[in-house]
Image (spheres, coloured by chain):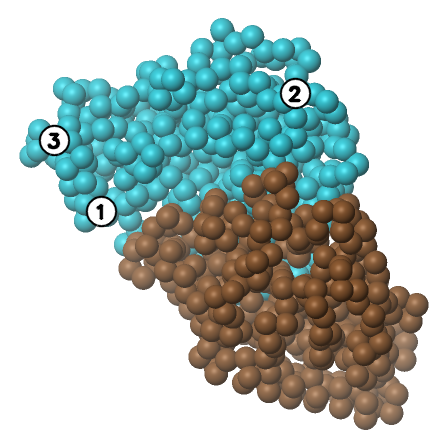
Chain colours: A cyan, B brown
């Protein structure tokens, strides 16, 4: 029996994807071996990585002005690769600090130039996205960096700033959860392990003119252009992770693409927040309503004891991964693309029952 | 039906490993989801990565003086990480150039200091490992770098130089194929996709005193100490690749460890070279006999037409991946740990039959 896995990542994958990967695990399309055993230079894997790229382009409406790359190292590696490649000589970059991952990105960028934090919600414990209408971005920054969704604190941008410099976003935890206009961005990156597949592959979407910014001194493997020139096959890519990403994006196309996915995600998060808001304070979400994440729904109960009991009893009923991040506490229900509405409904039933007994 | 896959990497994995991974793909140990869907911060994956590390230590006899790391980016990323971390300030490193991958390592190291090539077989088309008795390594180099097995040209070190500086080896294509004394090395690295598992994870074994060499300016993700301090979980590791590596190393322990593996590998390569050498020149291995690789057995036929025919007919008989690397031509039979003796025997039967008909 499949459980409902509310883990923040690595996270559950669509059941049809898991079943298909299992079915052809040892014998990929009649080859007599698994896709992970096949050379990346052969027709089978080349078809997989081609399809993965085409799927990403189709789902997100990405034009030929952008390169689509499959890299390694996770978003954490991108925290360095971004400034290493696109910080202009002697230049500075602007960052918005909306949580733990933004802070880490800022820390790494400081190795490569001056960093200006132009917006922060640190002093209010990251409970909101600072109102973008009040930002004063510079026209001469190398780029402006945001974190579109904050997994730990459960906040999310629901619109993006209009800026003249390249807008860069870490979208690890909400990529492909909704329709966005890629043309607003210079660079988007996302570790796959929340909405796209297993850990071990990182999607990078970069406007091609930015590929030329990289200083000569940057090592080959850390240059975006190396991977763009070789269709992400400069060296052996993480083939099985790319294969899983291809299957997940096949699935997204089959269900109708990102507009359909967005509707489902809206239904899921609305139902969950409605349950919290109508609980007469038994469940409390600490965040500014306008900044609530549709991917990671965080809430507190009246006591830590009740929170522990909640997690324990939910686990026993086949709902796992609900414990909040150690730095935030409480409960966190991560409801990425692969979480079906039925899983959220089951959680809601459980929450209401739990409140009746313990409220 | 499983084929025999002679691909240079990604390569075939042990059949029992593939079958077990398939069986528990959607339901890992009764959790109701796959290991790739489970958080890396939970007890299930923690047990996996602990086991992977313990297996590696046990198989290779690695003491507590060394850190064992599971990183991303492949050997190509290590070409930069090695000099970035252990090149001394204002120092130089020595490299032996024994093939394409050595040359790439040399190219990247030049970004971080002076590189001296102390031995090379480039002028004889990489057909041998330069005799280590004639090397004159410096006592004040930051390190000496070798490539223990050359996948493309089919040569291999069968002993290692004794040096006072840290000996660094790219062992991507012969790691755990035989017993070695890790204490001779300062640092060993290996992409997993030949002998250890699927692509997407890189094993690094580093003597702990070398962790202190890294300059302050090196970004967090590119510092070995970051990963050593966090047991390779500073950020989300490539969980499924680490899981597969744990299964492959379980299998190595089950068959009796590296001394047993080495005997099997010796039998495989001896039988294959014997077939080549007794073919009256129909099959020709171009390399110095003392430098022949036990992992990648390369040979030529009397014409390219016959080589094409050989590959085509072998494929039809369930032996795939035999085409030589595009830069070397000919035939290459990669016979890593997972290739059973029966696969090599089948190839030998085919070779003898093919010679009878076409010789």
Give the percent coordinates (x, y) of residue B209.
Answer: 57, 58
Residue at the left extreme, as displayed: A357
* Label 3 to label 1: alpha-carbon separation: 16 Å
Give the percent coordinates (x, y) of residue B356.
Answer: 81, 90
For marks 2 and 3, give the one nearer the viewer: 2
In the image, what residue occupies the spot 66% across and 61% down? A39
Write down the residue under mark 2.
A92
Estimate how packed mark 1 is, as few (under 14), some (14 to 19) or many (20 or more) residues with alpha carbons within 10 Å.
some
Left or right of A43 on screen, residue A339: left
Q: Which of A205/B115 is in front?
A: B115
Figure check: B11 above or below B113: below
Mark drawn on residue A315 = 1
Mark drawn on residue A355 = 3
Give the percent coordinates (x, y) of residue A72.
Answer: 59, 46
What subunit carries mark 3?
Answer: A
Res. A83 visible in picture: yes
Q: Which of A73/B65 is in front?
A: B65
Q: Secondary structure at mark 1?
A: helix
Mark drawn on residue A98 = none
Q: Secondary structure at mark 3?
A: helix
Left or right of B333 on screen, residue A264: left
* Label 2 to label 3: alpha-carbon separation: 50 Å
In the image, what residue occupies the spot 58% across and 47% down? B223
């Amino acid at each position: 029996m499949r459980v409902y896995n509310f883990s923040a990542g690595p996270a559950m994958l669509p059941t049809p994807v898991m079943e298909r990967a299992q079915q052809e695990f040892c014998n990929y399309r009649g080859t007599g071996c698994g896709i992970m055993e096949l050379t990346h230079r052969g027709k089978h894997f080349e078809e997989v990585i081609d399809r993965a790229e085409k799927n990403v382009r189709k789902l997100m409406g990405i034009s030929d002005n952008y390169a689509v790359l499959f890299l390694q190292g996770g978003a954490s590696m991108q925290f360095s690769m971004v400034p290493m490649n696109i910080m202009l000589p002697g230049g500075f970059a602007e960052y918005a600090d909306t949580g733990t991952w933004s802070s880490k990105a800022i820390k790494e960028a400081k190795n490569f130039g001056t960093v200006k934090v132009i917006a922060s919600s640190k002093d209010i414990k990251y409970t909101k996205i600072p109102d973008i209408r009040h930002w004063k971005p510079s026209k001469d920054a190398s780029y402006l960096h945001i974190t579109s969704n904050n997994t730990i604190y459960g906040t999310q941008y629901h619109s993006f700033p209009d800026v003249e410099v390249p807008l860069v976003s870490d979208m690890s935890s909400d990529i492909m959860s909704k329709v966005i206009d890629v043309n607003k961005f210079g660079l988007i990156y996302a570790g796959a392990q929340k909405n796209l597949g297993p850990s071990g592959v990182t999607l990078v979407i970069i406007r091609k003119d930015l590929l030329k910014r990289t200083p000569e001194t940057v090592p080959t493997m850390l240059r975006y252009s190396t991977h763009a020139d070789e269709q992400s096959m400069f060296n052996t890519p993480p083939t099985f992770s790319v294969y899983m990403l291809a299957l997940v994006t096949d699935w997204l196309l089959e269900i109708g693409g990102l507009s359909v996915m967005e509707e489902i995600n809206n239904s899921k998060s609305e139902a969950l927040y409605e349950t919290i808001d109508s609980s007469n304070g038994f469940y409390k979400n600490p965040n500014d309503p306008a900044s609530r994440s549709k991917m990671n729904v965080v809430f507190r109960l009246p006591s830590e004891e009740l929170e522990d009991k909640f997690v324990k009893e939910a686990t026993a009923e086949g709902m796992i991964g609900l414990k909040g991040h150690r730095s935030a506490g409480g409960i966190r229900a991560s409801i990425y693309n692969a979480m079906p509405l039925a899983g959220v409904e089951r959680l809601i039933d459980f929450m209401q029952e739990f409140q009746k007994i313990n409220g």
